[in-house]
Amino acid sequence: MGYNVLPLTRLIEHFERLPGIGKKSAQRLAFHVLNLPKEKAQDFANAILEAQEKIKHCVVCQNLTDGEKCPICQDESRDESVVCVVEDPRDVLAFERTKEYNGTYHVLHGLISPMDGIGPDQLYVKELLLRIGQGKIQEVIMATNPTVEGEATAMYLSRLIKPLGVKVTRLAYGIPVGSNLEYADEVTLFRALEGRSEL
């Protein structure tokens, strides 16, 4: 079903450009926004603009923040000797939800992907090396996703960091709790064996 009302069509097209939003979801969102009272629609638009204007990268870890440093880098109780390297700010949120990690982070904002034309220069690699050069960091945990790009990025960074005398570790990827070994693929089983720890 087509809409010829230009502002509505444009609104639907903008929602459709969002990741994970298909045509029907975009239409639902557009009609929802149209039915908002004017003040709420204005508040929604202002929230988008304010986020665009005020949110920037932390000067230390490159995570998103509205200040110079993010709350994690400002927290003096965090262990600055351990840095967890992640692809995306959403990964920081995932780790923080576990409430088990007390180190700091470094957000790359992407992964090395020659097929997509993304090399180390497009990521925040230099900033990570500068942090390591300050001498406080003793361990760097590679927490990139277990994909071809994630593994390539982890290996590339590991080769740069190890000569600096810093311990480089990789997240152990293994068998999900509640699953059967017979259904696990070889890579997962190998990772589970490799990442085993003493009981």
Image (cartoon, helix red, strand yellow):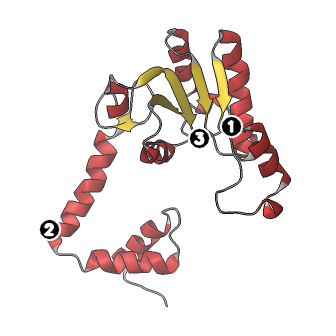
Q: Quadrant of the C terminus?
A: top right
Q: Amino acid at mark 2?
A: Glu
Disc 2: which residue:
39
Q: Amino acid at mark 3?
A: Gly
Q: Residue at x 75, y 63 (%)?
A: 180
Which tag, 1 or 2, sits closer to the chain's start?
2
Look at the picture and state if 20 lies above or below 90. below
Work out which residue is located at the far right of the displayed protein and give it.
186
Residue 29 x, y percent position in the rendering: 38, 75
Q: Is residue 113 visible?
A: no
Disc 1: which residue:
112
Alpha carbon separation for disc pair 3 and 2: 37 Å
Q: Residue at x 77, y 50 (%)?
A: 188
Alpha carbon separation for disc pair 1 and 3: 7 Å
Q: Residue at x 80, y 50 (%)?
A: 189
Q: Nearer the viewer, mark 1 or mark 2?
A: 1
Q: Nearer the viewer, mark 3 or mark 2?
A: 3
Q: Residues within 10 Å of mark 3 (few under 14, many from 20)?
A: many
Alpha carbon separation for disc pair 1 and 2: 43 Å
Disc 3: which residue:
110
Residue 17 in the figure: left or right of residue 198: left
Look at the picture and state if 198 lies above or below 24. above
Residue 130 x, y percent position in the rendering: 53, 15
Residue 164 x, y percent position in the rendering: 65, 10
Work out which residue is located at the far front of the displayed protein and give it.
199
Q: Nearer the viewer, residue 9 or 197?
A: 197
